[in-house]
Amino acid sequence: MKPYAARLVAYGFFVVLSVLFTMATALSVADFVKLLFSPAEGGDGVGAFAAVTTSEGNLLSQALKLLYDWLISFGQTHALIYFSLVVFGLYAFKNLFGYLSAVQMAVVRCKVVRNLRNLLFAKAMQMPLAYYSANRKGDMLSRFGSDLVEYEESTLNSVQQLVTAVVSMVLYIAMLFYISTKLTLFVLCMLPIIVFVISGITHRLRRNSLELQERNAFLTSLTEETVTGLKVIKAYTAIGFSNRRFRESNRGYARLRTRVLRRVDLSSPVSDFLGNCVVIGILLFGSYMVLGGHGDLSPELFVSYIMMFVLMIPPSKELTTAVSQIKKGRACVDRMQEFLSTPDTVADAPDAQPFDGLHSQVEFRDVGFHYTPGTEVLHHINLTIPKGRTVALVGSSGSGKSTLADLLMRFYDCTSGGIYIDGRPLTAIRLADLRRHIGVVAQDTVLFNDTIRNNIAFGTPEATDEQIVRAAQIANAHQFILQQPDGYDTRIGDGGDRLSGGQRQRISIARALLRNPDLLIFDEATSALDAESERLVQQSLDNLLSGRTALIVAHRLSTIQHADLIVVLEQGSIVEQGTHQELMELQGRYFQLVQMQSFQ
């Protein structure tokens, strides 16, 4: 809220004015009592009224006396009319300043939530892929959804209520002390009992609310997984199982939420009941003071005192409710703080330098890597990729092929050894510059629910229509794009669901080609395609690889026979490397893989 200090000051100023006008309305009740119940003499009773107002008192009493004297100078009937107009004006100003304070706080709340949402999204973009591998996507999505809503409703709204209640109560208590110190001390002696009771109700709210947010995150994640895997669920007739699992989780969430809301809702009626008990105590003790002459409290000021205290009950209730809501909302604040404070393990070093492209070679020097300590995925990888050469990585599943490609993109950092480009450590190059010069075509093609044109130009917003069409032509995608209902402006649905696998892959290749990268990474780009689609995609790859440096993660070995270097990985280590002919003559692991695929 620091950037909005001026609005917060204005908010506090308007709150103070609103409370002051409310207090003025309550204090004027004393004059109304005099006007209504003092006996009239003569035609308008001015003499009697003047006699009533000769009593001495504190400054407040004198101020009320001046107002009263001015009113009764018009006579009883006119005085009541003028008094009503004064009260109307006081209420009008009270509501006006209350509205202005609410407007100021509404702007602050909306902007704070907007900034926090931007901050969460920026953090999500910066987080390393290892974070998403170790955590549920639904858990992160709940921070953007339910956690943020809970933050605004429970925390920001409650902070607003808390500030208003505190300002109101401070002013009310100050005025109560000024009217009668003895009676106000009697009231304050009862407050510890109220505080003790309310704190007993709310002390477990924070822990229960944290558990509530975590269960809600699990429900969000479960829903996301279910919708994503709906085809599998239907195919395996697991709809009943999915419904039961969701209902059980939802039942536990509803039970816990009921328990939390029960505690939150209990604080308000309890504080209301205790406040009414205090009012009864004030009536008894104040009446004793007025009737017995044991204080300097006049009957009309006693009425104003009661009015003032009654006005203090709503903010006191808001205070207890706000405290319980803040404790409830603190759980989502903790979750968002935990997310925002998660360190970015893959980030630019302080001395990172610009990168203008590959000039000589990429070199892996004794590279080792693990996702979790104690479980090595890569061991002592030494490999050189000269500029303009194509290097293929082959091996069985889990041998570390895709991990090696991910390290080159710096989706992860090596846990030992290092990767060097033109002799410079990868960690000494700015991430944005590095990735700008690398094009990626993955097995699981990621397309967005947008037009074909925008998907090809993704990451290259400055591309012209001619460049987009040229990239699509080289990728063998131009013809099928023209057959779409709106050509390049056809929307392709979530993940490109309206296109076939081969079409999606060729759009992905066109997107990589449009960037004109120095280094290309293909992660099993044809492994999930049929023969015809594979042939078209392979033609696209051949066009794309012309004169470029490439690292190919290959599943179908027939697609990489013309690579300049084939590297065979097994259990995270390089066991063979050479050309296709050299490895076939060696009759080692690569020979076995080729024979198995030929047999298949």
Image (tube, grey):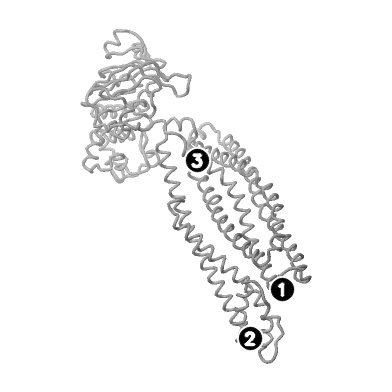
Q: Nearer the viewer, residue 124 or 559?
A: 124
Give the amino acid at mark 3: Gln
Residue furthest to the top: 586
Q: CA distance from mark 3 to mark 2?
A: 64 Å
Label drawn at residue 354: none
Q: Nearer the viewer, residue 15 or 461?
A: 15
Residue furthest to the bottom: 43
Mark 2: few/some/many CA within 10 Å (<14, 14-19, 20+)? few
Q: Nearer the viewer, residue 265 or 6?
A: 6
Q: CA distance from mark 1 to mark 3?
A: 55 Å
57 is higher (above) or lower (below) than 45: above
Give the amino acid at mark 1: Pro
Q: Earlier in the sequence, mark 1 or mark 3?
A: 1
Mark 3: few/some/many CA within 10 Å (<14, 14-19, 20+)? few
| Mark 3 secondary-structure assignment | helix
Give the amino acid at mark 2: Thr
Find disc 3 in the rendering and name its residue. 337
Image location of residue 364, percent across then percent down: 32, 20
Q: Earlier in the sequence, mark 3 or mark 2?
A: 2
Residue occupying the point 35% across, 17% down: 366
Find disc 1 in the rendering and name its residue. 299
Judged left or right of residue 448, residue 110 is right
| Mark 1 secondary-structure assignment | helix
61 is higher (above) or lower (below) than 152: below
Image location of residue 141, percent across then percent down: 48, 41
